[in-house]
Every structure is written in C-alpha cells, then in structure tokens.
Amino acid sequence: MTNIAEAQLIALDWGTTSARAYLMGADGHIVAERSAALGIMQVASKAQAETQSLDEAFKATLTELCGDWLDNFENVPVIACGMVGSQQGWTEAAYRPVPANLADPAFELASVEIAPGRTMQIIPGVLDLKELPDVMRGEETQILGAIDLAALNADDSEEQLFLLPGTHSKWVKVSGRTITEFCTSMTGETFALLSTQSILSKLIEPAPSANWSAFERGVKVSQSGEGAADLMLTAFSARTLVLTERLEKNEVSNYLSGLMIGAEICSVLGKQATNDALSLTICGNKELSSRYTRALNIFGIDQVRELQGTAPRGIWAVASAQGLLQTPSV
C-alpha cells in the first residue's frame, strides 16, 4: 500500500451534483478518497444563500472537501475534470473540438487560484461541432482512464466504442486516445421525469430488487419497433399493460427502463446490432452498467467490458502528459 506521505497529485472529479477527491501516489495509486454532494449546483446555491461570490463559494467548498490535503501537501499539484470547468462552474475551460487527442500535451488547461500562489488546473471538455452539436465534460477523462487501466490498444488506430451511461448517456468513438465523434442520449433524465412526474408515475410501485424479466420485456419491445422515435408510441404501454392486467405495478419501473435503454441502443446501433468486431466498453456505476450489458446482449452484442471508477486514472494521465507530476509515469 502506498504511503500517504508519498502523495503526488490531488485529483477532483467535480460534477453537477457531487464532487469526488482523490489523493494519488506513485503510478496513480489512490491512497485516499472522499466524495460529497458538493457539486456545482450546490456551490451556486451556497453562494446565493450566503451572499458570497461564486469564487469564494468554490474555494470554501474545496476547503470543506479536502482542505487538510491542501495544507499538508502544499507542493502537490491540484487538477480537476467535469462541470467545474463549465460556464456554470468555477471557470470555463474551453472545449476541444473533435478529433481530440485526450493525452495531447499541447492542449491547454484552464486554471483558477485556490490560494495565494497556488492554482488548480481544469481539464477542458470536448465539442463535436456537427449539424446538431454535442458536448461532454468529464466523460473524456473517464475514457482516457479506461484506456490506461485496461490497456485498450491505446497506441494504434483501432476504433473502439465507449458507452458512459447516466443522466445524459454518451456514446463515443475513439481511435487510440483520440475521440473522433460522439452523441448524447437524455435517457436517464427522461426516465426520471417519466417515472416521477408523468401519468406513468401514478402506477409505479416499488420493487424489492431489479425485475430482469420486466426489464428485458421492455428492451424487446423497443427492439421490435422502428427506432427511438417509437418510444413516444410505446412508452404509454407502461400504463395500458397495467390497466389490462398484463403488467404488475411493481414491474412498471423496470419495464420502462428496458423500453428506454432499448430505444437508445436501437437509435445508436440499429435493431440488429451484432458485430463480432465491435469493441465496446461501458464506464459507469455497476448497477446501471449491468442494465446496459443485459440490453446489449439482447441486441446481439455479448463482448462488453464494464469498468468503474476510471476518472482518477484519466486525471493522472492528463497530469502526466502535461508535466505536472514530480515523477511523470511512462
């Protein structure tokens, strides 16, 4: 186990609703970590409630999260990724356009002063300036971490597909360490709205555990349709199947989840997505990743790699490429 006194980097994955801090030692090993519901939305609310400037509120939040690390390791660099670098964050880190080499030492980091004479670097997001533009912040760093952790042919041009499920799921094509294109699906946010605020929510009863039969039923309904547009026609079946006694109320949530994840996969990969050459890696929490893996299996994709906690490794890789570490890793 790495000695905490050997800390070389303070890394933060700072998002919309939560912040995670990692104290990292030699070769990117995590020697200590913390997390709290201190995302940029909470910081903004705190600034308003306490009539602070946003800069003051972010400094106070950083101190609350890991002030002792900052005090004890005064010469250790501090670097962050995620929505902290958005327009609503501490300071905006300009997007990098695709194709974007995630480990390119030439790309510019943003920075903010966190104490007199000390700064925190912020990793920029990525922009896909297509007809309907797309953006990401934080996911690009998770992908870089996944590439490093799993040794996913990072030095060649083999195309790989990454899925980062969540409130706004990202499907990202990567060659080596370069993002070439990506798209976003608002599946998670839409599921939350439908299951808590729509007429469907009135029928939902809690289930003691995941009902995979109901989930897979929903996936197969989406697969049999003509694409994601059919979700507007099939979602109401979560109500009518209950009314006609063909779905239990405690199955509605899982059925709806299957409908939506199935529609997302169908929209991105097509109804019959079988591709033996497709390399697909999911970076997300275990429960959500397992849902997508099950749904992908139904679509004919059974070679799926699941990884969790890749952001700190990605931050370490950026810090190394930027020459911020005392002993950069090779």
Image (cartoon, rainbow, N blue to C red):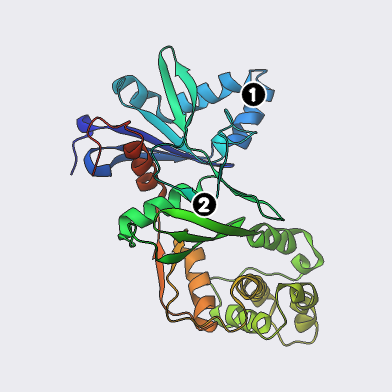
Amino acid type for the residue under numbered disc 1: Ala
Q: Nearer the viewer, residue 234 or 170?
A: 170
Mark 1 element type: helix
Q: Which residue is drawn at 61% across and 55% down?
A: 167
Q: For this rendering, which residue is in front, 222 or 158?
A: 158
Residue 323 seen from this side: yes
Which label was assigned to residue 99? 2
Amino acid type at circle 2 is Pro
State which mark lies toward you, 1 or 2. 2
**Is disc 1 in contact with disc 2, using a CB cutoff of under 8 Å?**
no
Q: In the shown orientation, is residue 215 left or right of residue 284?
A: right
Vertical placement of residue 183 versus 316, above or below: below
The residue that appears at 79% across and 72% down in the rendered structure is 232
The quadrant in which residue 27 appears is top left
* Residue 29 visible, this angle: no
Q: Which residue was labeled with disc 1?
A: 47
Q: Position of residue 196 (x, y in %)?
A: 73, 59
User: Dot 1 surroundings within 10 Å: few (below 14), some, or many (20 or more)?
Assistant: some
